[in-house]
Image: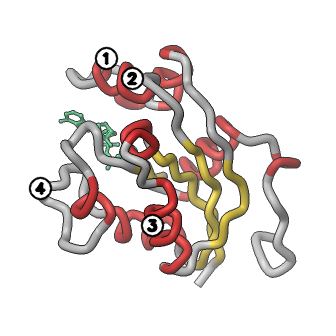
Amino acid sequence: MAVERTLAILKPDCVRKELVGEVLSRIQDAGFQLRALKMITMSKAEAEGFYSVHEDKPFFDDLTDFMSSGPCIPVVLEKENAIEDFRALIGATDPEEATDGTIRSDFAGSIEQNIVHGSDSPENGKKETAYFFAEHEIVANKSSME
Ligand code: ATP
Ligand code: MG
């Protein structure tokens, strides 16, 4: 299986609820390597740019208000099959539908404030990584990617 990168965001609710350590532990325990991480507060425009694929959805304005409401933590993760495995670790978008034991099932308060983002394809993983990190900010790993 190929080593992949995915872009996660610990969303503003994760930071606000002081779940950063717990969520990062779960991510590391599941075998993901941290390659880059920082805390930022997105402007409304940055949140709109990040979620532009959803710009026609009824929840777009609320979602981008939420995503720009406080600090969040974009993280570059690396693992074999990272995209799919990370989506499995976080669970379905709506915590009511998320499998027991997933991060969203255990911690998310609502479909909107659902603790964590994960890229949905390798192509989007690359785009989303570049949205937050310059290549030189991502820690290289000899065994990966090349
Ligand atoms: P993400 O892209 O954040 O990892 P996802 O891929 O599970 O989540 P998407 O369909 O891409 O889900 O939706 C992006 C985000 O928009 C969701 O994580 C959630 O915060 C919000 N969202 C999605 N659907 C709804 C909805 N029906 N009502 C309110 N917010 C929603
Ligand atoms: Mg998505």
Q: Are marks 3 and 1 in contact (CB under 8 Å)?
A: no
Which mark is in front, 4 or 3?
Answer: 4
Q: Are marks 4 and 2 in contact (CB under 8 Å)?
A: no
For marks 4 and 3, the one nearer the N-term is 3
* Circle 2 residues within 10 Å: few <14, some 14–19, many ≥20: many
Label 1 belongs to which residue? 61
Q: Secondary structure at mark 2?
A: helix
Image quadrant in which you'd find residue 6: bottom right
Residue at horizontal 44 percent and vertical 73 percent from the top: 85
Q: Are marks 1 and 2 in contact (CB under 8 Å)?
A: yes
Image quadrant in which you'd find residue 22: bottom left
The disc labelled 1 sits on which kind of residue?
Asp
Q: Position of residue 28 (x, y in %)?
A: 55, 74
The disc labelled 2 sits on which kind of residue?
Thr
- Please, is residue 136 above or below residue 69 in the view? below
Label 4 belongs to which residue? 96
Q: CA distance from mark 3 to mark 1?
A: 26 Å
13 sits to left or right of 9: left
Label 2 belongs to which residue? 64
For marks 4 and 2, the one nearer the N-term is 2
Label 3 belongs to which residue? 86
Q: CA distance from mark 4 to mark 1?
A: 22 Å
